[in-house]
Image (tube, grey):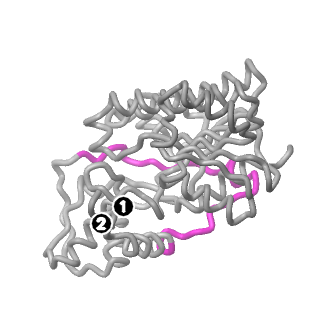
């Protein structure tokens, strides 16, 4: 299997997001020098003609497809049409024009929400399409499943080298801390921080606190993605995670400690819990030679430090 050259022309789609920014940092750290990226204003990936012109002009060799419309339970529940439409447009345009312009290899970022809501735990890659999806984010999940199947179909029909990876719940620098659209971990960081600053007596956490979740630091995901781009060429999807989980209650307690908040934690049981448990089986990834290096405690400290450094711009969002 041929690895990317340090001067290979590499396009990171979605380079400002949580995943894309981490991949960009990792490539720079590892000495890759010919990196291409565009803001959404410079290149609207929903616009097929704009994407066509971009690929024809740039002569890209490798693509990390990390561009997506993402959000937590609230956003997915309230805007399902936006999530399925925009994600289908983005990934279809990138995958198709990568093929039409001779891209050597593409890595597609999926999500573990593609798996059935009641999938056996830990979740193996083979469980895809074996049961019903979690209804609060099925529109997003179906778009991602379509992206996986599109990559596999292009490999089969056109002989492309497109791989798909399924990261577990992510967190880290450049995460979304907007309380209406964020995922649980960044939302809790912001809630506990603001409660500390404003001397609030308690912090409200959605749901019962019982769901079990796994969390992967974004820089670790990026490291895994670069590793797989260089060392994996299979047609089957690959889970990326740490292989360990904890309850939302335990997560809240960890974040409370990292932030230094001394008030109480209350659970709003009128709010949805989502999937009861979502832990991925990382046997395949581990067997390829990669394991996640960052502990949750260490990752939370790094993420909170980044939040504090960027708080002024984040609170406006």
Labels 2 & 1 near each other (Cβ < 8 A): yes
Q: Count all numbered tags in the image, as a single digit.
A: 2
> Residue 213 appears at what percent x and percent y?
42, 55
Residue sitting farthest toward the right = 1
Relative to residue 26, is residue 204 drawn left or right? left
- Residue 58 inside the magenta-drawn segment: no
Relative to residue 62, is residue 183 drawn left or right? left
Residue sitting farthest toward the left = 201
Instruction: Report which residue position mark 1 lands on.
Output: 186
Mark 2 Cα shell of 10 Å, populated few (<14), some (14-19), many (≥20): many
Q: Quadrant of residue 246?
A: bottom left
> Residue 221 appears at what percent x and percent y?
59, 56
CA gap between label 2 and label 1 equals 6 Å
Residue at image position (74%, 34%) is: 103
SS for callout 1? helix
Foreground residue, 51 or 254? 51
Region in magenta: 272-298
| Rendered view: 106 above or below 205 | above
Q: Quadrant of residue 159?
A: top right
Residue at image position (65%, 48%) is: 36
| Rendered view: 227 above or below 147 | below
Instruction: Report which residue position mark 2 lands on.
Output: 190
């Amino acid at each position: 299997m041929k690895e990317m050259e340090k001067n290979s022309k590499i396009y990171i789609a979605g380079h400002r997001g949580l995943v894309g920014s981490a991949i960009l940092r990792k490539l720079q750290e590892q000495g890759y020098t010919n990196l291409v990226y565009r803001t959404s204003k410079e290149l609207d990936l929903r616009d097929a003609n704009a994407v066509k012109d971009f690929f024809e002009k740039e002569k890209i060799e490798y693509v990390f497809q990390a561009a997506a419309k993402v959000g937590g339970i609230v956003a997915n529940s309230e805007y399902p049409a936006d999530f399925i439409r925009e994600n289908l447009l983005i990934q279809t345009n990138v995958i198709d024009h990568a093929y039409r312009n001779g891209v050597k290899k593409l890595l597609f970022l999926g999500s573990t929400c593609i798996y059935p809501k009641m999938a056996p735990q830990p979740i193996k890659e083979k469980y895809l399409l074996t049961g019903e999806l979690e209804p609060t984010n099925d529109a997003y999940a179906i778009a991602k499943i379509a992206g996986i199947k599109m990559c596999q179909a292009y490999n089969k029909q056109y002989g492309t080298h497109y791989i798909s990876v399924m990261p577990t719940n992510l967190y880290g620098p450049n995460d979304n801390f907007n309380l209406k659209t964020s995922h649980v971990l960044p939302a809790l960081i912001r809630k506990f921080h603001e409660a500390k600053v404003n001397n609030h007596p308690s912090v409200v956490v959605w749901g019962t606190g019982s769901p079990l979740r796994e969390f992967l630091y974004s820089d670790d995901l990026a490291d895994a993605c670069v590793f797989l781009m260089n060392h994996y060429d299979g047609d089957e999807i690959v889970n990326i995670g740490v292989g360990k989980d904890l309850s939302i209650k335990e997560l809240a307690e960890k974040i409370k400690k990292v932030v230094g908040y001394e008030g109480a934690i209350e659970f709003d049981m009128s709010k949805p819990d989502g999937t009861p448990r979502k832990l991925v089986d990382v046997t395949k990834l581990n067997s390829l030679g990669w394991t996640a290096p960052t502990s949750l405690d260490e990752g939370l400290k790094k993420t909170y430090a980044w939040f504090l450094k960027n708080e002024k711009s984040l609170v406006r969002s």
